[in-house]
Amino acid sequence: MAMISPTAAPAEEVRLITLDPGHFHAGLVQKFMYPGVAPDVHVYAPPGPDLNDHLGRIENYNSRADSPTHWQEIVYDKPDFLEQCLRQKAGNVVVLAGNNRRKTEYIDRCLKAGFNVLADKPMAINPRQFSLLRRDLALARKKKLLLCDIMTERCEITTILQRELARAPEVFGTLITGSAEEPAVEMESVHHFYKEVSGAPLLRPPWFFDVRQQGEAIPDVGTHLVDLVQWECFPDRALNWKKDIRVLSAHRWATALTPEQFRRLTGLEQYPDCLKESVGAGGRLNVFQNGDVNYTICGLHAKVTVLWRFQAPPGAGDTHYSRLIGTRAILTIQQGEAEHCQPELYVEKNSGMNTDTDFETTLRSAVDRLCGTWPGLKVSRVKGSFGYWHIIVPDQYRLGHEAHFAQVTREYLGFLAGEKMPAWVAPDLLAKYYTTTEAWRLSRKH
């Protein structure tokens, strides 16, 4: 999560407003109840399937047998929904997760009206929106409002452990500089259009496939990966987007969906007008949701890649790959068949130790210290390998993507109640969105 903290704690009860929900992440914020948060939630949105899907998801949470919620959704669904939201002031925290074409505008309007904002990524999908976001961050600070984007990937246990081991110089050493061809940091995310959420097939809104509304690969999903590069490699450091980031190159390419695949994803028999210019040979829809970016951050070379496919193989799902190269060790997260489709962390000796035995002793000592926070972690040499170990993570720490939304929301509520935010979060947020939107600009040159 990245946020701006108020200097004084709000004394009033937290009252949520959901504005124009069009993504299932808006519902996941309400998958659980929270102390100090009113059960009445005001929803302002245009009528249509996006709103219906959101309300249906909340109703499923309310009616489930295991730990049901008790949200009361109070809906305003007229064309002037935004103006009524700002005028009525029915709550003090606006939740944004939906069509990204207007998200930065929504953030701007809500801050000017005096609301705190909890926004799903991305906050900006092009350079014009990045310029507005810069002004919004200054406005939030001036008005002592809390502006936050939802960074759930920071809650994933193997990512947390990769970050911790990268901060252990006796194991990792320091990050190498790398090059554009051999980056010091490399992250890749593979996502799938067809998936299940809360046990049911997810119907995508048709605008999701219009990158002018959803955002392209790097400005959308790539936000998480660029955030992790910063969070893992430069923890607690205030980055300067003008001086510390240099975007070298970026590319974009399409995933082609058949008309039948589009029907399965949306329930629609025909492409809407907003997508017709993206239809190619054989009626296939070209969705530019693949991309990569090469850049330097504080002089170190990093590469981020995002790929979208139609559907994962049976038993699999979205995958994450992360590789950090240090002077003493290489830390890698993999999520393939060998890992049974769950992320696993591996440590490979790079240099700096005379023998595997010396390195393993040092690694075990570092992991033993981590057990003070996460009891049960173990180190296991990968069978048949030399200088290669697997960090065994107990299942109790593998909470899953949907549960991470509750973790981020609870953290947000804590800061809303007055817990002090570190000074680096605002500049790091700007560095992140500069990287992703500058990648958008460069990719269009190619």
Image (tube, grey):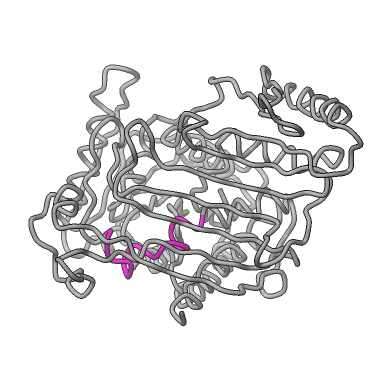
- Indicate left or right for 132 with 239 as reference: left
Q: Does 431 sit above or below residue 117?
A: below
- Indicate left or right for 445 with 65 as reference: right
Give whichever of 400, 328 is nearer the camera. 328
- Indicate left or right for 155 with 384 as reference: left
Q: Residue furthest bottom?
A: 445
Q: Residue 207 at x, y = what percent?
A: 24, 61
- In magenta, the rendered stretch is 208-223
Q: Which quadrant of the figure has residue 19?
A: bottom left
Q: Residue 388 at x, y = what percent?
A: 72, 33
- Residue 215: say if magenta: yes
Q: Residue furthest front?
A: 384
Q: Residue furthest left?
A: 269
- Residue 162: say if magenta: no
Residue at left offset 23%, top offset 60%: 81
Give whichever of 399, 180 is nearer the camera. 180
Q: Residue 353 at x, y = what percent?
A: 89, 38
Q: Residue 425 at x, y = what percent?
A: 65, 55
Residue at left offset 61%, top offset 52%: 5
Give whichever of 95, 431 is nearer the camera. 431
Q: Which quadrant of the figure has residue 139?
A: bottom right
- Indicate left or right for 332 with 258 as reference: right
Q: Does 49 sit above or below residue 386?
A: below
Q: Which quadrant of the figure has residue 230?
A: bottom right
Residue at left offset 37%, top offset 54%: 308
